[in-house]
């Protein structure tokens, strides 16, 4: 389940980067935290860049 959550978070990050017109996302990081017993959140973030 955590792998699926990580994949979903990554796809959302990629979609946002594409929406902004980015060519790539660099320095990607993943973070997880427990929010309730038996539940966690997955956060994926990076820097969207454009080639000039």
Image (spheres, helix red, strand yellow):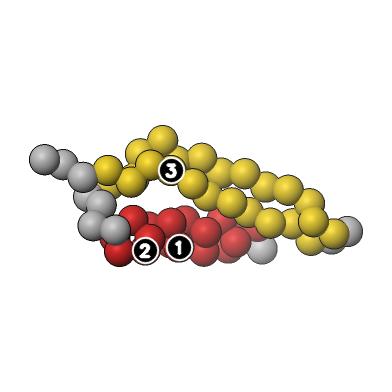
Quick one: SS at disc 3?
A: strand
Pinpoint residue 18: horizontal percent, then vertical percent: 29, 60
| 1 horizontally vs 8: left or right | right
Q: Nearer the viewer, residue 52 or 40?
A: 52
In the picture, the quarter occupied by the C terminus is: top left
- Left or right: residue 48 versus residue 7 is left
Check disc 1 and report the residue beneath it: 12
Vertically, is 38 above or below 52? below
Q: Of helix, strand and loop, which one carries label 1? A: helix
Question: What separation in Å lies between label 2 and label 1 (alpha carbons)?
Answer: 5 Å
Q: Position of residue 32 (x, y in %)?
A: 67, 47
Q: Residue furthest front?
A: 20
Q: Residue at x 49, y 46 (%)?
A: 45
Q: Quadrant of residue 47?
A: top left
Question: What quarter of the picture does the N terminus occupy?
Answer: bottom right
Decide: marks 2, 1 in contact (CB < 8 A)? Answer: yes
What residue is rendered at 56% in x and 56% in y? 6
Q: Which residue is mark 3?
A: 46
Give the number of the disc on residue 15. Answer: 2
């Amino acid at each position: 389940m955590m792998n699926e959550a990580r994949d979903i978070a990554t796809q959302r990050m990629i979609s946002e980067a594409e929406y902004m017109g980015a060519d790539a996302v660099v320095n990607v990081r993943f973070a997880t935290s427990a929010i309730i017993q038996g539940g966690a959140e997955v956060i994926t973030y990076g820097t969207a860049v454009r080639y000039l």
